[in-house]
Image (cartoon, rainbow, N blue to C red):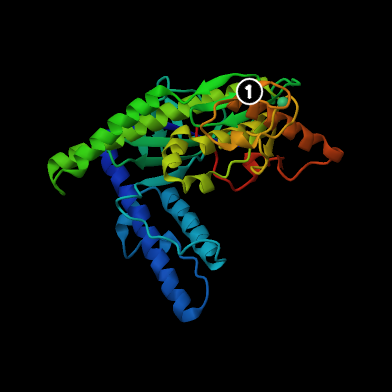
Amino acid sequence: MNRVAYKYRIYPNNEQKEYFAKCFGCVRFFYNKSLSDMIEYHKTHKGFKNITPATYKDEFPFLKEVDSLALANAQLNRNSAYKAFFRSVNKFPKYKSKKNDQSYTTNNQQCSIRLSDNSKYITIPKCKRIRIKKHRDFYGDIKSATISKTTDDKYYISLLVEVEIKPLERNDNSIGLDLGIKDLIVDSNGNKYKNHKYLSKSQKKLAKEQRKLSHMEKGSSNRNKQRIKVARIHTHINNQRNDYLHKLSKKIIDENQIICIEDLKVKNMEQNHKLARSIIDASWSRFVSMLMYKASWYGNTIIKVPTNYASTQLCSSCGYQNKEAKNLKIRKWTCPECGSVHDRDYNAAKNILSKGIEMLTKDGTHPDSLFMLDPLGSSSKKPPLL
Ligand SMILES: [Zn+2]
């Protein structure tokens, strides 16, 4: 079983908005209050006290008005944040703020979360018939739902669905991918997938509106309007990009059994300020994570070829290492040894493929960089958002 989250826009009426505001508030209140009480308790008693929502319900009767599952989920989240802190793998558990935490999660119990009227409405515990825009289908059983409100006052519902995914029909194709800045991907068959133009168009617009925003007086109503405008452009860019990356990663997964990619240490490259912008735009890391979880669903093999492997410098025909090709500006070069003419990225993709296959077949053992992923359902990883 795999878990997938599907996010949809919802259009609550005023009464429903009021109810959501109450839920967000109560969840935040319970989370923060119980967290600080637990920390106090730890100071005096040196122990862990699992404070439940029931503890506060007499003193704060408004907690009774909201979905008790929402509070129960807040309790679970708080406990994992608290415990992670004491295992010192995480920073101190953060308190929820009104600005950033406008969400709550509830569970499906005997169809308490369900769609109705041709999927035009969704019902959740304590809140009936919320208008929903179901822009894509999902298959499987709804486990839980998270309601959220964005800074630009839009509401969303994210449904966590459990689904069994059938493996694709097998093929013997393998492919190498070079991730780049000019082209998002060049593959070892010579295909190039552009970093879409519309992204940079939207980004120009974003930069313009952000500049406007920065000149507006703090606290003014115009500034508030502008803030919402900027947030909308952000969402738009994000949606466009996700859509493109989903289609592209699915295509590559469908067509190839073995996929070799460069193990990019994106973080290292981000230190270079000029490159950073392009890297974010290109969304390499998002693309790679989409490939990884789709591979785990459909049973493809992903091989990460180590970065120190000089994929751009080797001639894919004869293996000669051309150190001059290290320079990023050189897009085309001719091998001084065998005379082959190389497109920089296409050549790199071919080298990534042959190195990956070499790693896969070496001594018949699996190299460390071969990803045998756990099915997502059995790990604690966040499920992918579709
Ligand atoms: Zn050569």
**Outermost residue, bottom direction?**
44
- Counting from the top left corner in percent of width and height, residue 381 is at 58, 46
Q: Going 48% across and 28% down the picture, which residue do you hit?
A: 182
According to the image, label 1 marks what residue? 342
In terms of secondary structure, where does tag 1 sit?
strand
Left/right of residue 363 with respect to residue 11 in the rendered view: right
| Quadrant containing ligand 1 | top right
Left/right of residue 149 with respect to residue 279 in the rendered view: left
- Counting from the top left corner in percent of width and height, residue 83 is at 53, 63
Label 1 CB sits under 8 Å from any ligand 1 atom: no
- Counting from the top left corner in percent of width and height, residue 377 is at 63, 41
**281 is higher (above) or lower (below) than 338:** below
**227 is higher (above) or lower (below) than 59:** above
- Residue 3 visible in this rendered orientation of the protein: no
Q: Nearer the viewer, residue 367 or 273?
A: 273
Which amino acid lies under the numbered mark 1 shown in the image of this protein?
His
Left/right of residue 255 with respect to residue 104 in the rendered view: right
Q: Going 60% across and 33% down the picture, which residue do you hit?
A: 325
- Counting from the top left corner in percent of width and height, residue 170 is at 74, 21
Q: Nearer the viewer, residue 97 or 280?
A: 280
Q: Nearer the viewer, residue 279 or 348?
A: 348
**360 is higher (above) or lower (below) than 62:** above
**Outermost residue, front direction?**
336
